Amino acid sequence: MERVTRRRRRAAVVVAGLVAAVAGSVWFEPWALWVDETVNEALPSASATPRGPTTDEPSSASPVPVPSGPVTVARGTFVSHEHATTGVVRIVRLADGTHTLRIEGLDTSNGPDLHVRLSDAPVKEGKAGWDVFDDGRHVDLAELKGNKGDQNYPLPAGFDWSAYPSVSIWCDRFDVSFGAAALTRT
């Protein structure tokens, strides 16, 4: 009888260990550290439609000039936090007046539940900057498309991006910044 009880205990310990290993793997996603996702998006273009007369009749009013291409209005360089992170981030005003957050040359670790986050928190180098991007005001733009390359994140119409002077590659699962950049107007 004692022998059967020991076997059941061992079996229960083995089953509990397997359940813990599977649950830990699902939560931590350790394979993401060895799998890179590269994204290489071109800068979006918006067709500029000049504003002016809509009839064939001549008008003395001049059309309102529209920028012919994208203009960088702010930029920053990533600093590393929890994981080594390099690259440049820009806020780009397109010809139609919309804004896009563009990340170029990104190189960071992959991980679970990574997001691009705008924040009003200051960018601090090293460990001091790991967890500040959820303390104040912040906006989660989207899930990070890839941990390497060039990618675009359109900003919502009417969004005041200047109220959020920093960008973080944020791991929502563990509430930590992989890297961040302070935006400076150009």
Image: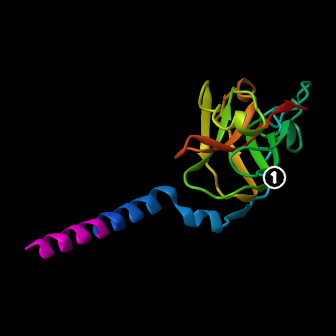
Q: Quadrant of residue 20?
A: bottom left
Q: Is residue 75 above or below residue 25?
A: above
Q: Residue at x 67, y 35 (%)?
A: 118
Tell me residue 65's x, y (percent): 89, 32
Majority SS type along the magenta span: helix
Q: Is residue 110 above or below residue 119?
A: below
Task: Tell me the colour scheme of the image.
Answer: rainbow
Q: Magenta span covers which residues?
A: 1-14
Q: Quadrant of residue 2?
A: bottom left
Helix, strand or loop for disc 1: strand
Q: Quadrant of residue 96?
A: top right
Q: Residue at x 91, y 28 (%)?
A: 62
Q: Residue at x 74, y 42 (%)?
A: 101
Q: Which residue is mark 1?
A: 104
Q: Is residue 125 visible?
A: yes
The residue positioned farthest toward the left in the image shown: 1
Q: Amino acid at mark 1?
A: Glu
Q: Quadrant of the N terminus?
A: bottom left
Horizontal relation, residue 122 to residue 144: left or right: right
Tell me residue 73's x, y (percent): 85, 34
The front one of 138 and 72 is 138
Tell me residue 170's x, y (percent): 63, 43
Query: How many callouts does the rendering have?
Result: 1
Q: Is residue 93 visible?
A: no
